[in-house]
Image (cartoon, rainbow, N blue to C red):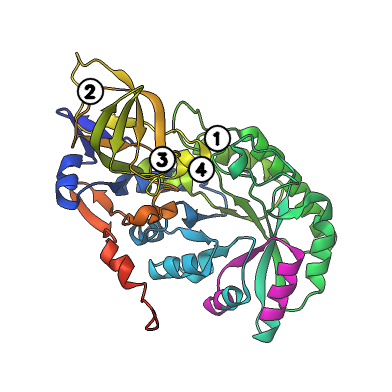
Amino acid sequence: MTVFVYRDGILHTEDVAVPAIAAAVGTPFYCYSHGAMVAKYREFEEAFAGMDAMVCYAMKANSNQAVIKTFADLGAGADVVSVGEMDRAIAAGVSADRIVFAGVGKTRVEMARAIDAGIFQFNVESVPELEMLSAVATGKSAVANIAIRVNPDVDANTHAHITTGRKEDKFGIPWDRALDVYDLAGTLPGLNVTSIALHIGSQLTELAPLEAAFVRVVGLIKDLRARGYNIRHFDLGGGLGIVYDDEQPMTVKAYADMVRRVTADIDVKLVCEPGRVMVGNAGILVTSVVYVKDEARRFVVLDGAMNDLIRPALYQAHHHFEPVLQAKPHAIWDEVDLVGPICESTDRFAEKRLMPPLAPDDLIAVRSAGAYCAVMASTYNSRPLIPEVMVRGKQFAVVRERIEIEDLIAREPIPTWL
């Protein structure tokens, strides 16, 4: 679904002109398309039709309440990695029995809260976590449903910082120890071993690594059942990639067709945990030009910064930049560096990027900013957290207000003895 389009030379989100939003909330801000999110969820729903599958939105991609509610209203569950995300999911309308709790560092408090909430399952990633969860559950006279996350030692062929399925990564149980750890789990009280889970990385664009991992896990499910374990659920993880530059990611249908083929001879409930693919291309960051600085290079200084969009600094990530007012056909495009105002050399979004002539106050849209942008934002340099806006048809609403410096200062009381 294409939702960010020029109409009469003005960029629109669905049926709302982006400059109208900028006039109302100021820049920078994130802007999300409700329609794009709904369309992507429907794509998963249709692709997995006929399979016993539950889509649990991976909230770490974007945990805004309006975003979560959009998916909850469509029937989605949630994949969470903290008790804070669990609370957000429930507050937005996700039923606790459709929540999967993942992550390598769950605390006793988080485990207890999730048991009390009645979540669908814990994805356990280490023996110490297994033993702690057993102790917490038995202390509450409860039983926790668990999957053990196995590390299939498959290279996802993605950026090193978002690869999670190799033996040297911190996630999951090593492949050659999986049966032993399941045997241990089977002896521990308070645990109901119902599932197996994996997740090999993020921004995956190739089917082959996923298929190799799934084939290995299907074999392990058969081995576990032969040993008497009632494995009823297969947690596929997430990680499907999107287009940032010139990638050619797999389609949801191709992914689902592969899953259907690989799991055809086992009877399991599938849990799918898409995040980036659900929201990444459903959002933009809108920023404005502060200065154009001509020295050895031409720098376009924006009011958005790496605290608002850290992906280029963190992952060397590519984002498309385009003027909100469409460039004239005769405009001469020159190479510029797009940078922010933060006092760091890494506050550089793009180098030698072709852009049309720009002037102060011109609006710039940064594409593919719906995932891992607002959730990774900070207040570095005492910059306020910027607004998030959602558009639905001809309507838009602020779904997170700008958090001003006064709000931040108010949270930092000065001791009376200073």
Mark 2: secondary structure: loop
For marks 1 and 3, the one nearer the N-term is 1
Location of residue 40 by image quarter? top left
Q: Which residue is mark 2?
A: 357
Tag shown at residue 314: 4
Mark 4 and mark 2: Cα distance apart in space:
28 Å
- The 10 Å Cα crowd at callout 4, few under 14, some 14 to 19, many 20 or more, is few
Mark 1 and mark 2: Cα distance apart in space:
41 Å
Nearest the viewer among 75 and 139 is 139
Q: Is residue 90 magenta?
A: no
Q: Amino acid at mark 4?
A: Leu
Tag shown at residue 254: 1
Tag shown at residue 347: 3
In front: mark 3 or mark 2?
Answer: 3
Mark 4: secondary structure: helix
- The 10 Å Cα crowd at callout 2, few under 14, some 14 to 19, many 20 or more, is some
Q: Quadrant of the N terminus?
A: top left
Q: In the figure, 369 relative to 418: above or below?
A: above
Nearest the viewer among 218 and 333 is 333
- The 10 Å Cα crowd at callout 1, few under 14, some 14 to 19, many 20 or more, is few
For marks 3 and 4, the one nearer the N-term is 4
For marks 4 and 2, the one nearer the N-term is 4
In percent of the image, x 38 and y 43: which residue is there?
369
Image x and y of residue 405, in percent: 28, 62
Q: Amino acid at mark 2?
A: Pro
Look at the numbered discs 1 and 2 and tell me whether their residues touch, using CB distance below 8 Å: no
For marks 1 and 2, the one nearer the N-term is 1
Q: Amino acid at mark 3?
A: Asp
For marks 1 and 4, the one nearer the N-term is 1
